[in-house]
Image (cartoon, rainbow, N blue to C red):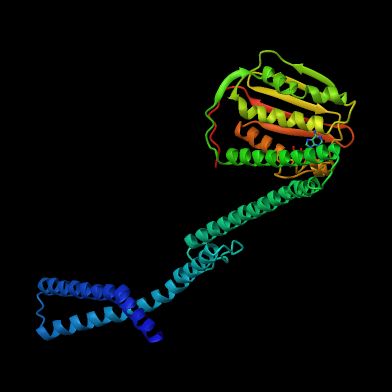
């Protein structure tokens, strides 16, 4: 096996170097002969056949010797500057192919290395780190979904078992059935949100832009919570500028308003206030949703747009931490801005700023 490899290496060397240098030696010898001929004609010197043959031989073997020396030097140079970095890069790529994204190509910018390989190595390292963060996101996502599914499924299993008990009083039967329905609704909501988020993350073009009155849309969405604020005695304060037209995908924007309103009501105790305001300038519409609810600490505020993040676990049964991730994605798609100001025990204000004119949205995905 080793012999065979050595033999192959020799063949490769002959193919790559010797053929080339033999050709060079031959061409140099021919040039030399031509030079001698011109010289002898010009100086009226007569060379004997012996002289010429000796000169040709010396030139040829000199050229061969020098070529061989350079072949050796070049082989060593290639080993250090080409073969070594290529081997390292190939080894890293192979490890990545096997799913190991922690691999990094060691620095190649040594004294003798080609800068081009250094650039390729830097690109491969960047690719590996990107892939590893995508992989972490994917595994985190699966872990989160499984975790979120387990709770309602366990509730459904337990209450389903309770329902099987003989001679169950009617009120208990109704209560258990309601718990099961709530848990299944929660599961269905989560699936709907995951599907929406997935669609939004993979979609690249949003062609459904229409021009409509944003104030009207905000009122329509807000009114859906009427029963909630009446039931819990929450004060409402609405200040909406008239005739604010926007050109955008209405269905996507309604996702934003519904999520912000639902959070405002969810996190506000009875007797609190939820305010909605719409203002506009030439280019932007600004929507503010304020509540006097529990508020959040800066640590919680820093994570609220992450998928599955829930800062307030006491409200966890009424959500799955996907609402604000959806909101953020939609606002990004609309090339808008979203900000939050909050203080624990005082309340929260979400401010959404969107562009009013039509824009062709093509995300970078
Ligand atoms: P969910 O409401 O399902 O928990 P969201 O993504 O809508 O998920 O919100 C993420 C977290 O942000 C919430 O768990 C909560 O801690 C915080 N949050 C969002 N809106 C408010 C608000 N109006 N007041 C206080 N905290 C809020």
Q: Which x, y percent locates residue 130?
A: 59, 54
Quadrant (top left, top right, bottom left, bottom right) of the C terminus: top right
Using the image as rendered, state which of residue 305 and residue 37 is in the foreground: 305
- Which image quadrant is residue 199 in? top right
Q: Quadrant of ligand 1?
A: top right
Label total for image: 0
**At x 12% / y 75%, what residue is drawn?**
40
* 5 relative position to 184: left or right: left
Q: Residue furthest front?
A: 167
Vertical side of 316 occupied by 110: above or below: below
Quadrant (top left, top right, bottom left, bottom right) of the N terminus: bottom left
* 65 relative position to 224: left or right: left
Q: Which x, y percent locates residue 310?
A: 78, 43
Q: Which x, y percent locates residue 97?
A: 52, 63
- Which image quadrant is residue 189 in? top right
**At x 32% / y 74%, what residue is drawn?**
17
Using the image as rendered, state which of residue 74 and residue 138 is in the foreground: 138
Q: Residue furthest top?
A: 242
Using the image as rendered, state which of residue 124 and residue 349 is in the foreground: 349
Q: Which x, y percent locates residue 158?
A: 79, 49
Q: Can residue 305 be seen in the rendering of this structure? A: no
**At x 66% / y 16%, what residue is drawn?**
244
């Amino acid at each position: 096996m080793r012999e065979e490899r050595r033999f192959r290496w020799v063949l490769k060397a002959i193919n790559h170097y010797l053929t080339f240098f033999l050709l060079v030696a031959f061409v140099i010898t021919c040039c030399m002969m031509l030079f001698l001929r011109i010289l002898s004609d010009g100086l009226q010197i007569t060379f004997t056949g012996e002289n010429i043959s000796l000169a040709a031989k010396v030139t040829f073997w000199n050229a061969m010797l020098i070529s061989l020396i350079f072949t050796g030097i070049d082989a060593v140079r290639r080993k250090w500057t080409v073969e070594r970095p290529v081997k390292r890069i190939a080894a890293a790529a192979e490890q990545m192919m096997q799913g190991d994204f922690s691999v990094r190509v060691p620095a190649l910018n040594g004294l003798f290395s080609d800068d081009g390989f250094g650039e390729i190595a830097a690109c491969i390292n960047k690719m590996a780190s990107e892939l590893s963060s995508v992989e972490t996101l994917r595994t985190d996502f699966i872990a989160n979904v499984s975790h979120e599914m387990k709770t309602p499924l366990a509730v459904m299993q337990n209450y389903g078992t309770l329902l099987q008990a003989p001679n169950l009083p009617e009120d208990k039967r109704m209560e258990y059935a309601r718990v099961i329905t709530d848990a299944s609704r929660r599961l269905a909501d989560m699936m709907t949100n995951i599907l929406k988020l997935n669609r939004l993350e993979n979609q690249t073009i949003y062609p459904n832009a229409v021009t409509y009155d944003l104030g009207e849309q905000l009122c329509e969405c807000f009114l859906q919570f009427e029963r909630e604020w009446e039931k819990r005695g929450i004060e409402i304060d609405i200040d909406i500028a008239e005739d604010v037209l926007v050109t955008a995908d209405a269905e996507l924007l309604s996702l934003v308003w519904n999520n912000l309103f639902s959070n405002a009501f969810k996190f506000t105790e009875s007797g609190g206030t939820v305010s909605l305001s719409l203002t506009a300038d030439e280019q932007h519409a600004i929507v503010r949703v304020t509540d006097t609810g529990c508020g959040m600490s800066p640590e919680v505020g820093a994570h609220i747009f992450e998928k599955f993040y829930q800062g307030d676990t006491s409200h966890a049964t009424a959500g799955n931490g996907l609402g604000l991730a959806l909101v953020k994605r939609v606002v990004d798609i609309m090339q808008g801005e979203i900000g939050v100001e909050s203080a624990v025990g005082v309340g929260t204000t979400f401010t959404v700023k969107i562009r009013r004119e039509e824009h062709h949205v093509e995300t970078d995905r």
